[in-house]
Image (tube, grey):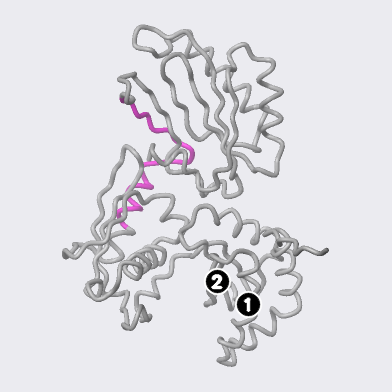
Amino acid sequence: MFSRRARTPAAAIAAFWEWWAHVGDDLAAAIEAGQVEKAGRELARRVSAIHSDIVFELGEGMSARHALVLSPEGSPSLRSITERWLRAGPGSDATWEFFPARQPNLRAFEGQLTLGKRIFEPGKARFGAEVDADRARVHVLVQHPDFPFLDDADRLRASFLLLDWALGEDDVERWLGEIRVTGEEQPFDVAGVRDAVAELSARYGHDEWALLEGMDDRGTLVEVRVRVPFPRMDHPLFDLHGSVGLSYRPDTDGLPDVEETGALEAVTSGLLTRLGGSAVLAAIVTKAGIRTLHLYADHQGVVPAQVTAWSGQQARARTAEWLPDPGWEILRTFY
């Protein structure tokens, strides 16, 4: 008896780059000869083998003649796959450069595309932008005169394409919060959205922290510290979430006093020193005698084993649980 063994993304990625080594120059020649459709047919098959929901785009390069983009199409769970594809490749040269997500493309606002049965002009889009400095987010409204003639799926796809072209796919994830489609006239063109994000990004350096305080559904005081801006794009291969619980003596409001805070920070610093660059501390939640460290790491690494060994040496360590979370969905409630 025989069974078909499922291809993993890693195997398909390796096969892609082996194939590319033989055809990259021919694809460039076909594009320059105006035969883009012919060049794209086999490319589409190879990309689909990596994952059926990843799409590719061919275009002009920034520092090379041509660019090949693999887009996760807004799916956080696919972004680590496109990053692994990029890192397995040969790197850019004078002919080709490669990107694991859509890059800003302001020229797209000067052209047209077909959505449904309509010719859609991106340059007619208008935007509303509200800066939420506490959470390092820009909330966006998207309006276009053709939206009433598109179905819901095409309106949503058009909105994300517009924002991807305005900011780049990674910065949409990094800086934008709520994104809503509206039929009401909005004040900004694409430059206005870019200005709002630039204004927010100027307020934050790298790896800063925001402090959030509130009550949980039981009325317990909760203190949350999160990295801002949303740090997933700075660690695209970290697709495994770990929660590490540390116990402390709570004061009257359930939080640690100055002495306990110092002890918790010392323990946390020791763990992070041990893990080095193999993991990132993305959030800290403190309530009712437990401080929970939210870590992210590469599922192909040894961080869970390192944490287990470390926990056995710590009197305060209570729990360590690990779950796949390539989109960092566990943290999104904080943003």
* Label 1 vs 2, first from the N-terminus: 1
Residue furthest to the right in view is 1
Three-letter amino acid code at the position of disc 1? Leu
The crowding category of the residue bearing disc 2, from other C-alpha atoms within 10 Å (few below 14, some 14 to 19, many at least 20), is some
Which one is nearer the viewer's eye here, 323 or 326?
323
Three-letter amino acid code at the position of disc 2? Phe
- Real-space Cα distance between discs 1 and 2? 8 Å
Numbered mark located on residue 140 in the image: none
Q: Residue at x 66, y 43 (%)?
A: 299
Left or right for 101, reference 92? left
Which one is nearer the viewer's eye here, 332 or 104?
332
The crowding category of the residue bearing disc 1, from other C-alpha atoms within 10 Å (few below 14, some 14 to 19, many at least 20), is some
Which one is nearer the viewer's eye here, 158 or 189?
158
Left or right for 110, reference 14? left
Residue 3, image x, y percentages: 77, 63
Start and end of the magenta stretch?
A: 195-214
Q: Would you name the residue on which mark 2 appears? A: 56
Disc 1 vs disc 2: Cβ atoms closer than 8 Å? Answer: yes
Label 1: which secondary element = helix
Tell me the quarter of the image containing the C terminus. Answer: top left
Q: Residue at x 75, y 61 (%)?
A: 5
Q: Residue at x 58, y 38 (%)?
A: 323
Is residue 254 on the magenta stretch? no
305 shown above or below 8: above
Tell me the quarter of the image containing the N terminus. Answer: bottom right
